[in-house]
Amino acid sequence: MDFDRLSETMRRLALEAGAAIMEIYEAPEMGVQQKADASPVTAADLAADRIISDGLRAEFPEIPLVTEEQAATHGALHGDFLIVDPLDGTKEFVQRRGDFTVNIAFVRDGVPIRGVVYAPAKGRLFYTNAVGDSVEEDGTHDPSRVGVSVPIRVAQPDNRALRVVASKSHRDAATDAYIGNYAVSDFKSAGSSLKFCLVATGEADLYPRLGRTMEWDTAAGQAVLLGAGGRVVRFDTHAPLDYGKPGYENPFFIAHAPGVALKPA
């Protein structure tokens, strides 16, 4: 794998998809529909998916692609694959809350080792570089020109005063009860895969998710967090969260900085 080309391509396609998303975000009509599972899908999801999937297939035709918006790509896979959520946080998008992201990841041996998370309404761009280290890019986010890339790293947590981030749209009593097991000094709510990135940058220490997610929701964020020195583990066993599972559905999980004393399920 040419990781230089992969990093450049994922970055460029995420920015191009983000620009298409923002055109629709700022328009009066978002083209909201319902999928078979009653979750929303918008014209922005479909436009971003087209940009990313066409671009990845053109650049890496030999690598299987899984993307949320194309059910035909959801079959069983082995070995390397690319996985995409073109617009994670559709509820935040529809409500014009800004906490939505473009997500592209590359998975090898069940681990997302490269990824990009772009939050176009927030102006934040996170990705793994060619060697797998995570950065946040400052500047204008020009698809054709890389800006200043600032290395990011998880914080050294203080278990007497942990900083926790949790879902803005999917909080429930079970999540609150689990968070209650920790000594928390600060709590943030955020949407989409931004939660992984807040742990990766050291803005939070712990992100528990006791709810349904799919691998395309989490792969890019997990890649960014791993590249910043963080961890993502299953909620029940604390084993690493892996990818390529049948149906691409995740178990509950915990994303955290090393040093957080995880509580049992």
Image: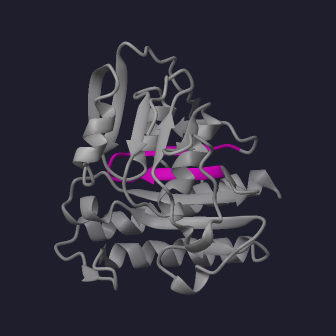
Is 60 above or below relative to 170? below
Looking at the image, which residue is at 40% across and 27% down?
Answer: 203
Q: Main secondary structure of the magenta part?
A: strand
Residue 147 visible in the shown view: no
Looking at the image, which residue is at 22% across and 71% down?
Answer: 27
Which residues are drawn in magenta? 114-129
* 123 within the magenta span: yes
Residue nearer the viewer, 191 or 12: 191
Which corner quadrant holds the C terminus? Answer: top left
Left or right: residue 135 compared with residue 29:
right
Residue nearer the viewer, 167 or 60: 167
Which corner quadrant holds the N terminus? Answer: bottom right
* 105 within the magenta span: no
Residue 105 visible in the shown view: yes
Is 249 above or below relative to 50? above
Left or right: residue 180 compared with residue 119:
left
Looking at the image, which residue is at 51% across and 59% down?
Answer: 250
Residue 101 pos. (x, y %): 41, 56
